[in-house]
Image (spheres, helix red, strand yellow):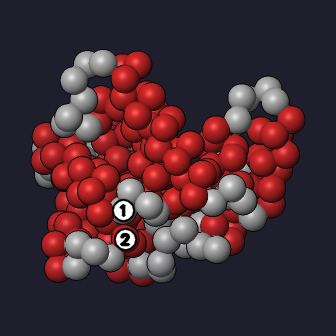
Amino acid sequence: MSVFKSNPALELLESKKEWSLAKKMLYTNWLENKNDLDNLLRLGTECWYIMSYWEQIKVNDLKKSDISSALTEVKQYGELHFSNSETFLWIFGYMIKLFPYWFDDFSGDLEGFENLGRNMIIRSLEINPNNEIAKMLCSPDDGPQYIHSCSKVKMDLNQYFPGNSAIEQYFRGIWS
């Protein structure tokens, strides 16, 4: 049920605030095996997290353009090669919907990119109608399905995100 494979090396680099080394390690891992979905998800979510928390984590040895370029690269690769992966679809759909401007291919069409993200989440739910995270992300915020899915996701947060990487802590924090 875990969304990500355990990655102690990543957790160690993040704990030391070595964001540049973490990104470099994940990018190298992805280049070595692009068809490993976990490599793609780890790199994509790390880049998105770094962009999202740029000021708070005080990244001095990275350029935003390098991070957004890598984020876009894995998004585009994922769209071509993992378009039937429910996990790829809900994670990238969520990231695109929330912060579309972190992606290099964002054209300024906010509504269009939000729709892209929403459609990816909907596609994830079509692939697996039992995916409570996708149900939660697709449901209106005040509807009974949303409340039910939130409750189920909250109950299983430590199973979905058992590790201590920044993105796992992020998801546990926002959905707890």
- Crowdedness near tag 2: few (<14), some (14–19) or many (≥20) residues, C-alpha within 10 Å: some
Residue 121 percent location from the top left of the image:
53, 44
Q: Which label number is shown at residue 90?
A: none
Seen from the viewer's position, the closer of residues 163 and 38 is: 38
The answer to whether residue 19 is seen in the rendering is: no
| Image vertical order of residue 59 relative to residue 139, above or below | below
Q: State the SS at label 1.
A: loop
Residue 138 percent location from the top left of the image:
64, 38
Q: Are marks 1 and 2 in contact (CB under 8 Å)?
A: yes
Residue type, mark 1 in image: Phe
- Relative side of 38 to 25, left or right: right
Q: Which residue is drawn at 26% across and 38% down?
A: 103
Q: State the SS at label 2.
A: helix
Residue 19 occupies which quadrant of the picture?
Answer: bottom left
Residue 158 occupies which quadrant of the picture?
Answer: bottom right
Q: Which residue is drawn at 82% across and 50% down?
A: 151
| Image vertical order of residue 116 relative to residue 83, above or below | above
Residue 93 percent location from the top left of the image:
45, 43
Q: Which label number is shown at residue 37?
A: 2
The answer to whether residue 27 is seen in the rendering is: yes
- Relative side of 109 to 150, left or right: left
Q: Residue at x 20, y 67 (%)?
A: 27
| Image vertical order of residue 40 relative to residue 96, above or below | below
Residue 30 occupies which quadrant of the picture?
Answer: bottom left
Residue linked to disc 1: 82
- Relative side of 122 to 77, left or right: right
Locate the N terminus and report the quarter of the image it occupies.
bottom right
Q: Which residue is drawn at 63% across and 67% down?
A: 160
Residue type, mark 2 in image: Leu
Nearer the viewer's eye, disc 1 or disc 2? 1
- Relative side of 51 to 15, left or right: left
- Crowdedness near tag 1: few (<14), some (14–19) or many (≥20) residues, C-alpha within 10 Å: some
